[in-house]
Amino acid sequence: MTESPRTSARAVPDRPVLDGLEQRWDEVWQAQGTYRFDRTAERGSVYAIDTPPPTVSGSLHVGHVFSYTHTDLLARFQRMRGKAVFYPMGWDDNGLPTERRVQNFYGVRCDPSQPYDADYEPPADSGALKKGTPQVSISRANFIELCHRLSAEDEKAFERVFKTLGLSVDWQHTYETIGDRARRAAQRAFLRNLARGEAYATEAPTLWDVDYKTAVAQAELADRDMPGAYHRIGFGREGAEPVFIETTRPELLPACVALVAHPDDERYQPLFGTTVRTPLFGVRVPVLAHELAQPDKGSGIAMICTFGDTTDVTWWRELDLPVRSIVARDGRLVMTAPEGVAPAPYAELAGKTVKQAQKRIVELLAESGDLVGEPAPITHPVKFYERGDRPLEIVTSRQWYLRNGGRDTGLRKELLGRGEELVWHPGFMQSRYDNWVGGLNGDWLISRQRFFGVPFPLWYRLDLEGEPSYDDPLLPAEADLPVDPTSDVPAGYSADQRGAAGGFMADPDVMDTWATSSLTPQIAGAWEDDPDLFARVFPYDLRPQGHDIIRTWLFSTVVRSHLEHGSVPWTGTALSGWILDPDRKKMSKSVGNVVTPLGLLEQHGSDAVRYWAANGRLGTDTAFDEGQMKVGRRLAVKLLNASKFALAFPEAEAGAVTEPVDRALLARLADVVDEATKAFEAYDYTRALERTESFFWAFCDDYIELVKGRAYGADAPAAASASRALRLALDALLRLFAPVLPFVTEEVWSWWRDGSVHSQAWPTSQELRLAGAGTVDQDCLAVAGTVLERVRGEKSRAKTSMKTPVLRLHASGTADDLTLLEQVADDLRNACLIADLTSEVGEGPFVVVSLELGEAPPKVARA
RNA sequence: GGACCCAUGGCUCAGUUGGUAGAGCAGCGCCCUUACAAGGCGAAGGUCGGCAGUUCGAGUCUGUCUGGGUCCACCA
């Protein structure tokens, strides 16, 4: 492909092409600030978007291209409707994904006990590390430096993809979730939550990832089917047969604190109130009754361990049982047996992983005869951290929580009410929200025992023994935020008092990434930092996002806004669907990594890829379909060529649309504008595109063919009417296509118009009706279409060229039809090469009665 | 176990308030026609997952079943 020659800024190229449009127009848009937010606009004329900050942990994938295009379509429509569009971009670079990427990329591990090394440099061949390369321990500060370094590189790459894709983001409004502004907002919001009693810390059993060594929240859980086995184990009784339980976690036997059966279970009623002895470890545990025990499960009686699953936690709490923990935070069994547990057999398990311990204890139980029969294999769902590799354990630890209605019916109702206030696109997605909020079983655990995150902004006083007092933390002033309590010093203390008796210590934890992400409206809108801006954008108009994170991002954002501002964070939300493999599965990582966004954009062109994305309705999963991209590319090419044709004739004076066909075309286009507008207003960009596209192809195939002869012809007024109508139609069409095909429409616009098409007003039917001289009968186009179709059909059937003349054509229809025919007769003679066009009044619809083809013209070799 | 979405020609999908189905792609045939051959034109191809209802009439409303998919819950 060669670059189209362009002699001046306003000329139609001889051979227009799509290649290179992305770079050329992105540069112009950035230079001219085409998408800059007008921050003098009043709230009423602002359209504010709470853009999803993509996770910066590698590369964007096809799904991003898909859903971010959806947002851009809506943004561009709103902009053309006269709104000042606030369309920021954020980078979600804090949290575990970045840590994991840094670990793998540089082959390092964060060890908070290491001192900072100012001269540390990661290995030069980073990024090509083989799996299993031993990780180098570096300090927390060095680790965080690497997080910043790597995420900054990724963010540059992401920005390039988004610009190539043509997102009309205002790149002057960007933020990072680990940036100062985000940390300040997250800490400020937390301090206010704390002051209002919405945030609290407590020591309790929590779900724990043994690899990441952090607590995780309910919203981050994922069930995975895992192989397991029921082990039937006997518990000894004084002077009676043993009681048999079945468990999938025999390794937790040393942590057993009771047995439990349903109160109505007659088999076990005699045992309630008695005690039994755990095999191997000889601990005396009570047999208790609780409604949660299911008689039909296993043997109907379960062992309660501290802690095997969340039901254990419930039993432990409600039955007021002691703690006998054996699983440490690294996923290994503690070295010392809990009190009362026989040390000898336990010593065989100490230090082993849960998996290893299970293997050994099964051997021990088999040897001792306490294991009955062979373990019965089953497959059962096991809770995982959604990013984790090993099943979650439950450990007791001190954690921060934020009230989210999980333990408070009143708050839960209010939050359901907020969901009701939102306009959901599509509407059925609200049930996801309702399901989730209705099913919450605890408050939101917001603390993480990690490094690259927003630290909790507080310190604890140390008493004279050096023990922290958690009840009255030392808090920073809001004006001092953000703070890092591990390096900053609380007011009234000096740095050398850190960790000293009578001094202070930092809260060691960072916030859950969602605790920051839930504040994206506040961060992007510069809450408190720039009250003027915030007032112009909040509450936002739109939250676009994936439907998989309704329970996390969407819900948590509603929670924060409800607590802090007493309102919804936005008035509407648009949920994009998944990208599916050609075999209808969710787009797999492997495919997603092979098909890189930039590669796609380069191969098909951004407009073509956007066209494919625009065909995916909100909330609907869409197949990854390069065929659709080819169709989109063809559409863009067609737009270039049709525009070139439409602009080939001299510009006529205003009001020169006189011919019925021309006026009918504009009238039909006016209807299309109305439909597209209505669809876009309802967030149905797909329908808007479909209507526009359908009109456009008819415009090319029928209308242009019909008026071509007249436009080239010598009848000046008639030619002027065609030229004028072509330009009016093109003008409106370019604007209708502009949200979907920003590059090609801008290119064509630049051939004959000033400014950017993206700054123009969205077309209205009114302007077309005015230009097209009011209401006209569109049916002459239908009559012409009937003739065109028939003539093409006959020529095709006769396997002859479209240049073959029609000697005679005879049509029949109502008197009205024949009047319409008369209006288009000249154009039809030109377009179809009809020598003799006759008609008669007849019954029924307009129809071509007969036609006779002439001789095909001699084939002439083209130059 | 609870909730939600989907099921229309080989493939991907339209079908707005109910009136006997539309498009694109693929396949097939034809055409170098002065905007367009990485193009254009044309013909063919479905009775709308099954069943039962409401209705004069249902792809389009109700119930039910089947088959996909998703979310949540359970997970001794």
Image (tube, helix red, strand yellow):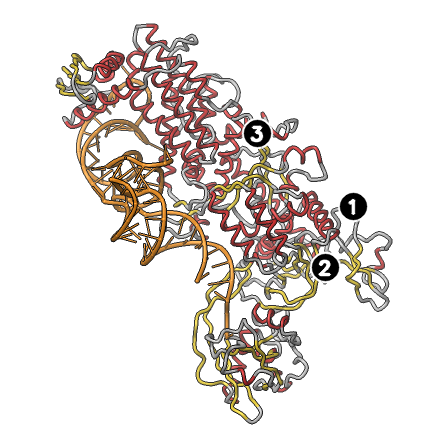
Q: Can you tell which mark lies on residue A480?
A: 1
**Mark 3 falls within which chain?**
A
N-term mark: 3 or 2: 3
Along the line of sight, the residue nearer the viewer: B49 or A266:
A266
Residue at numbered disc 2: A508
Please say if the residues under marks 1 and 3 sit with CB atoms less than 8 Å apart: no
Q: What residue type is disc 3 on?
A: Tyr
Please say if the residues under marks 1 and 2 sit with CB atoms less than 8 Å apart: no
Q: In this view, does A201 lie above or below A87?
A: below
Q: In this view, does A672 lie to the left or right of A87?
A: left
Q: What residue type is disc 1 on?
A: Asp
Q: Can you tell which mark lies on residue A666?
A: none
Identify the element where label 3 is drawn.
loop
Which residue occupies 71% across, 45% down?
A184
Distance from label 3 to label 2 (Cα)? 42 Å
Residue at numbered disc 3: A35
Please say if the residues under marks 3 and 2 sit with CB atoms less than 8 Å apart: no
**Could you say which quadrant of the image residue A633 lies in?**
top left
**Could you say which quadrant of the image residue A494 lies in?**
bottom right
The tally of labels here is 3
Residue A102 percent location from the top left of the image: 60, 54
